Amino acid sequence: MKLLLAEDSALLRAGLEQLLSSLGHSVTAAMDAEELSAIAGQETFDLIISDVRMPPTMTDDGLRAVHDLRASNPTQPVVVLSQYVAASYLDRLLEHGGFGYLLKERVSDVEEFVRTLDEVARGGTVVDPEVVTALLSAKRTGLAQLTAREREVLGLMAQGLSNTEIEDTLVLSAGAVSKHVSNVFMKLGFRSEDSNRRVKAVLAWLRHTER
């Protein structure tokens, strides 16, 4: 794949660039959000990998850069790396569906990291398992109606799993998973005619974390 890697830490950037190149990918590196935006505005990439915090302000510059890029091109696959569990980051990226959000410590698990890149490049949505665990532990209005099994199913949905993959993971029948997913949609107030209910369900779950 043709990748754009934006990371201000020289050590991490070099490590990721070496890893990705060794896997056969073509990697273009950017050191800050402005360079990320400039490069992405001139070339097309199969996947963009970006840190959240980077120059020039060292706040959420990387996030805002990829958010703006996806606003003009919603199908652009993006994996965001962060040191923090922050629902607001996810909230903004979920506006267009299909993305990856990993805690930086997850990068050390090379197999899982590569799997995430492949999944997101195909248009999937992956949320770091630790983020899912943290968000599930919070109590949220409107989500309290979900049973333990329904919360578990929603958590797997947030990790990008399809109904079939959820069946395999939880060792449930297709009918049981379909029923749990339907109950999640119903309890969150999504009707059958609502488009993209899966993404909306995950968004409704994540956006209340910091309230």
Image (cartoon, rainbow, N blue to C red):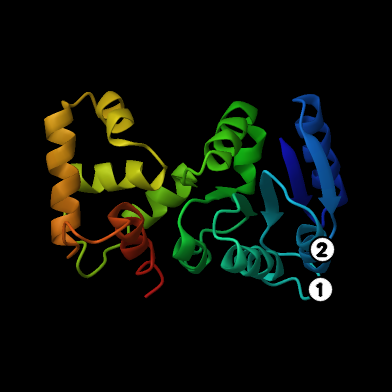
Decide which of tag 1 and tag 2 comes sooner along the chain: 2
The structure residue drawn at horizontal position 77% and vertical position 39%, both measured from the top left corner, is 16
Nearest to the observer: residue 138 or residue 202: 202
The structure residue drawn at horizontal position 31% and vertical position 52%, both measured from the top left corner, is 198
Q: Measured along the vertical axis of the image, is residue 10 above or below residue 188?
A: above
Q: Are marks 1 and 2 in contact (CB under 8 Å)?
A: yes
**Location of residue 151 in the rendering, given as x and y in whole percent from the top left corner:** 24, 48
Q: Is residue 191 left or right of residue 157?
A: left
Q: Is residue 147 left or right of residue 97?
A: left
Q: Say which quarter of the image contains residue 25.
A: top right
Quadrant where the C terminus sits is: bottom left
Distance in Å between CA atoms under marks 1 and 2? 7 Å
User: Which element type, helix, strand or loop, lies under badge 1?
Assistant: loop
Label 2 neighbourhood size at 10 Å, few (<14), some (14-19), many (20+)? many
Nearest to the observer: residue 176 or residue 131: 176
Q: Measured along the vertical axis of the image, is residue 143 above or below residue 164?
A: below
User: Which element type, helix, strand or loop, lies under badge 2?
Assistant: loop
Q: Which residue is mark 2?
A: 32
* Circle count: 2
Q: Is residue 177 left or right of residue 101?
A: left
Q: Amino acid at mark 2?
A: Asp
Label 1 neighbourhood size at 10 Å, few (<14), some (14-19), many (20+)? few
- The numbered disc on residue 56 is 1
